[in-house]
């Protein structure tokens, strides 16, 4: 019986293909609109495909139901990450007042060349008549996960 659990654990670990997982913490300062977060990752096998996702950790005191970010790698794009339903129920998992949401941004991406690549992320939140929210509060961490398919 114990061997079954051991085999399952080994299979689970063997199936985990994360090649890169890194986080940036904002602590109590908040995420300033001019603060671009840069993540570097290495592609060492051009025969494989890669999935990309962002993980957002926030408190339940975050005042919006979504998060808009500018995402730049080979192209620049605006991405909306839903953190709560329209009724206000948090979508992320967590305990106490911290929630974590994973948002897939690319699936099965191929690379022509091995090497180091960069993803740059900026918060792009706007509210009402404000051109931008200078300092976004209650976002604790943002992470980039690049995993082999």
Image (tube, grey):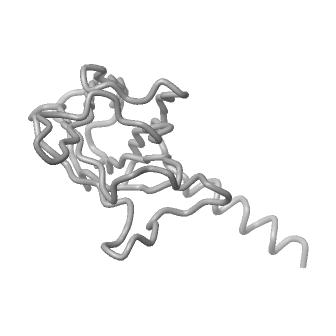
Q: Quadrant of the rendered structure where residue 72 is?
A: top left
Q: Quadrant of the rendered structure where residue 94 is?
A: bottom right
Say above or below: 1 vs 32. below
In the image, taking residue 99 as reference, residue 45 lies left or right, namely left
Q: Nearer the viewer, residue 21 or 46?
A: 21
Give the residue at the far bottom of this rendering: 1
In the image, taking residue 144 as reference, residue 21 lies left or right, namely right
The structure residue drawn at horizontal position 31% and vertical position 55%, both measured from the top left corner, is: 104
Give the residue at the far front of this rendering: 129
Q: For the N terminus, give its image quadrant.
A: bottom right
The structure residue drawn at horizontal position 75% and vertical position 67%, both measured from the top left corner, is: 7
Residue 36 coordinates in the image, percent (x, y)? 28, 22
For the image, the number of numbered tags is 0
Q: Nearer the viewer, residue 25 or 60?
A: 60
Residue 16 coordinates in the image, percent (x, y)? 55, 53
Residue 85 coordinates in the image, percent (x, y)? 35, 72
């Amino acid at each position: 019986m114990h061997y079954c659990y051991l085999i399952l654990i080994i299979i689970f670990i063997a199936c985990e293909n994360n090649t890169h997982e890194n986080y940036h913490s904002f602590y109590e300062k908040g995420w300033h609109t001019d603060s671009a977060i840069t993540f570097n990752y290495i592609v060492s096998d051009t025969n494989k495909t890669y999935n990309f996702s962002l993980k957002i950790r926030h408190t339940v005191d975050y005042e919006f139901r979504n998060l808009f970010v500018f995402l730049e790698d080979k192209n620049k794009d605006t991405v909306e990450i839903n953190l709560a339903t329209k009724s206000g129920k948090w979508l992320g998992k967590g305990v106490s007042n911290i929630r974590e949401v994973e948002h897939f941004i690319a699936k099965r991406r191929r690379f022509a060349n091995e090497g180091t690549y960069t993803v740059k992320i900026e918060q792009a939140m706007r509210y009402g008549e404000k051109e931008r929210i200078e300092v976004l509060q209650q976002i604790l961490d943002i992470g980039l996960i690049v995993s082999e398919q």
